[in-house]
Image: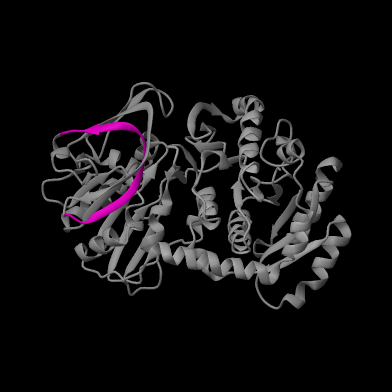
């Protein structure tokens, strides 16, 4: 018997769809149901590796964790990874399918609905309930033709929809009522109710607002969800989450880590465990500002467009700031694309990221990178060069090698050397993501930089936060009523 399903769409991006689905997944799992998350199409450079050796959006990996099931490529059959302002890499069922600009994708996506429905069908055969997350907003009616992410999927699969609005950004009444006004009546008929998210203050002050939304839309209200401050302890879905953590926390951390934020930054959840450490002051720096002169570590994150971001890094003067940082005795660590930038050259002879091109790197590691069409996707374990155990995952396109590879950053299980380190040990690069999620590695890095880890079990913190958020949703949503409408 096929599982029931319920879809959660939003009045816009970043209204909290991903976290609400994660919280509901945990709440229903705690009720004894087998829950599987699903997102037909995601656009994010924050991705995770699955057990099958594929990749999905990081938000779906978090939702799988919330449901206490292994992440699967079928949970996010179409993943778009932006490589430029107008183009993206298309990942289908975990594997690179094509590159396309926005206009071409509108034609390509019509052939992707079959993959979407296949993935959904596989999950539905294994679960009690499938929680589906939309993308963007159904009010983007200019994209409705051929849609596979919102109402196009909901109608093709016969899945009822709950619409989420975010009161924290303002205009929630207009956004919910306006969505009802602009979408096709047949699409509106798929919506069985609405939720208002991230409310601050006395809920009694918005009772009239909830009534008015219901009156003007004809949809019942399923609840007003108060702001949940600990949501910051869970990984954000996309780069909008970076702006919510602008700058550093209040001064007091003994270890200052500066992170240049470049346009195509990827896998930025590598920062989350550092954010959780009281002894760390994490400073995110956008182009237009200088890297702080008193940083202990400059951390270069991954990139979906290494050559493009390298050019931005130089144009922003970050290369000059990094050179000065090293003269002052600081450390530099590059992760994935950041590792590639640290080398002597980065070449893209086959136009993987755009036009075929090459550029000089920062020259801080004696290695060179050649980008290739084959993507490495795997979970790994091993130990860093100082003998501290580590675990993480690789997700990259390219081969990096050279003399500094003789001093590997890590030795992985099976004896495979990985990454590179400069002769003085103050510059290092690695393809490993999830490095700081490993409590032992994070503690070793903080000690190396003159700080001390708080003894935090990061993965336990995420689990506890999911439990608390599930309880929060149980208290503020008409969950039984929503479940009764799933089909």
Residue 439 x, y percent position in the rendering: 31, 62
Residue 171 showing in the rendered view: no
Q: Is 394 inside the magenta-drawn segment? A: yes
Position of residue 227 in the picture relative to residue 393 (left or right): right
Q: How many labels were placed on the picture? A: 0
Position of residue 371 in the picture relative to residue 194 (left or right): left
Task: Return the residue nearer the eye: 332 or 376.
Answer: 376
Residue 178 x, y percent position in the rendering: 80, 52
Residue 119 showing in the rendered view: yes
Residue 26 x, y percent position in the rendering: 58, 61
Outermost residue toward the left in this view: 423
In magenta, the rendered stretch is 387-402
Outermost residue toward the front in this view: 1
Task: Return the residue nearer the eye: 220 or 208.
Answer: 220
Q: Which residue shows up at 66% across the image and 30% down it?
A: 113
Q: Which residue shows up at 61% across the image and 70% down it?
A: 471
Can you tell which quarter of the image residue 155 is in? top right
Q: Which residue shows up at 39% across the image and 64% down it?
A: 458
Q: Which residue shows up at 65% across the image and 64% down it?
A: 168
């Amino acid at each position: 018997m096929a599982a029931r399903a319920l879809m959660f769409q939003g009045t816009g991006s970043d209204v909290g769809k991903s976290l609400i689905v994660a919280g509901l997944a945990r709440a229903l799992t705690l009720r004894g149901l087998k829950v599987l998350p699903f997102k037909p199409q995601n656009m994010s450079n924050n991705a995770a590796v699955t057990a099958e050796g594929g990749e999905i959006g990081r938000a779906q990996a978090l939702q799988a964790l919330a449901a206490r099931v292994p992440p699967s490529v079928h949970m996010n059959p179409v993943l778009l990874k932006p490589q430029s302002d107008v183009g993206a890499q298309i990942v289908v069922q975990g594997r690179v399918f094509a590159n396309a600009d926005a206009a071409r994708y509108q034609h390509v996506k019509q052939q992707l609905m079959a993959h979407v429905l296949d993935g959904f069908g596989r999950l539905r055969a294994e679960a009690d309930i499938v929680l589906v997350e939309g993308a963007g907003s159904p009010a983007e009616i200019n994209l409705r033709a051929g849609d596979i992410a919102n109402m196009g999927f909901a109608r093709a699969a016969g899945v009822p929809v709950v619409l989420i609005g975010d009161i924290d950004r303002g205009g929630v009444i207009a956004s919910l009522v306006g969505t009802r006004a602009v979408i096709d009546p047949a699409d509106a008929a798929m919506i069985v109710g609405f939720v208002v998210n991230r409310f601050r203050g006395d809920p009694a002050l918005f009772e009239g607002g909830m009534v008015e939304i219901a009156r003007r839309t004809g949809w019942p209200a399923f609840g007003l969800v108060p702001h949940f401050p600990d949501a910051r302890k869970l990984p954000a879905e996309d780069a909008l989450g970076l702006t919510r953590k602008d700058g550093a926390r209040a001064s007091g951390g003994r270890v200052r880590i500066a992170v240049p934020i470049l346009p195509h930054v990827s896998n930025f959840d590598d920062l989350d465990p550092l954010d959780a450490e009281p002894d760390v002051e994490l400073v995110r720096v956008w182009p237009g500002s200088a890297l702080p002169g008193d940083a202990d570590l400059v951390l270069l994150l991954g990139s979906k467009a290494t050559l493009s971001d390298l050019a931005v890094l130089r144009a922003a003067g970050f290369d000059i700031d990094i050179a000065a940082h090293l003269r002052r005795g600081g450390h530099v660590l590059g992760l994935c694309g950041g590792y590639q930038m640290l080398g002597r050259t980065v070449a893209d002879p086959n136009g993987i990221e755009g036009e075929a091109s090459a550029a000089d790197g920062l020259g801080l590691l004696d290695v060179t990178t050649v980008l290739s069409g084959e993507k490495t996707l795997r979970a790994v374990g091993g130990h860093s060069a100082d003998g501290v155990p580590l675990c993480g995952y690789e997700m990259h396109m390219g081969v990096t090698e050279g003399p500094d590879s003789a001093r590997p950053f890590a030795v992985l299980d099976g004896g495979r050397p990985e990454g590179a380190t400069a002769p003085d040990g103050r510059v290092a690069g690695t393809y490993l993501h999830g490095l700081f999620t490993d409590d032992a590695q994070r503690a070793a890095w903080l000690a190396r930089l003159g700080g001390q880890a708080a003894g935090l079990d990061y993965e336990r913190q995420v689990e506890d936060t999911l439990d608390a958020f599930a309880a929060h949703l149980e208290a503020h949503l008409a969950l039984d009523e929503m479940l009764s409408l799933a089909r």
